[in-house]
Amino acid sequence: MSVYTHYHERTLVLCKPDTVQRGLIGEIISRFERKGLKIVALKMVMPTEKQAKDHYCWSDEEKEASGNRTIEALKAKGLPVVKTAKEYAEDVQRRLYSYLTSGPIVAMIIEGAHAVEHVRKVVGHGNPLSADVGTIRADFTTDSYVAADDVDRATRNLIHASSNVDEANREIKIWFKEEEIVDYDLAIEKILYSKEWENEREMLIKKRNKSS
């Protein structure tokens, strides 16, 4: 029987086209498995334009925030600001659509206690140049926001991970049907989460003592 805590949640992970082309799928999946997280859905997909647009569907507030980050970066580099925040954000979206639809991806749903936060820590900062050593993006790519901006493309940062539970719930519906999600027992869940595991060992020791 699966062991759940009050903190269990699901999150979406996409291994982007550069991950597939570089043969890093297994390496990336193993990072999550070694962490103790459970994969409850997994498939290879050739993303459609609609899926890409649905996935990177931003509200006006999100566009404003993204565009303002771009404007701040331009000012920091002493470059002119020639567009509105919304226009800069739409440029980013256009690049992301192109990036995500450039080849097959591997989509997966990961489950566990604090899954969203744990996955994002394993993945690392969106800009590989700022990612901590030991994270996927720091360890497996040398790209950066500035290198990508210079040639008008998305940063090839290998992987997408939902930023919060609400976002995960929305994104999961884009890539998976409910019947594709598998509920199953994972052997390590008992060790990770269950108090009974400790009790079983105590009982085993008592039995040994009685029989000796």
Image (cartoon, rainbow, N blue to C red):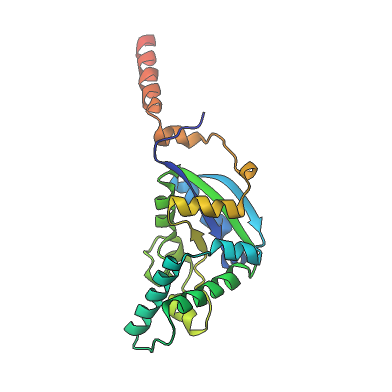
**Total of numbered circles in the picture?**
0
From the top left corner, tell me how far across and down residue 119 is, in percent. 44, 53
Classify residue 146 as left or right of residue 29.
left
Residue lying at the far front of the rendered structure: 60
Q: Residue at x 40, y 30 (%)?
A: 194
Classify residue 132 as left or right of residue 24.
left
Classify residue 120 as left or right of residue 20.
left
Seen from the viewer's position, the closer of residues 28 and 16 is: 16
Classify 92 as above or below 50.
below
User: Does residue 77 appear in the picture of this structure?
Assistant: yes
From the top left corner, tell me how far across and down residue 83 is, in percent. 44, 84
**Which quadrant would residue 134 be assigned to in this image?**
bottom left
Q: Residue at x 39, y 14 (%)?
A: 207
Q: Residue at x 54, y 71 (%)?
A: 96
Rendered-image quadrant of the C terminus? top left
From the top left corner, tell me how far across and down residue 103 is, in percent. 65, 67
Classify 15 as above or below 142.
above
From the top left corner, tell me how far across and down residue 70 is, in percent. 40, 77
**Which quadrant would residue 17 be assigned to in this image?**
bottom right
Q: Residue at x 54, y 49 (%)?
A: 109
User: Does residue 29 appear in the picture of this structure?
Assistant: no
Classify 146 as above or below 192.
below
Classify residue 112 as left or right of residue 176.
left
Classify 52 as above or below 184.
below
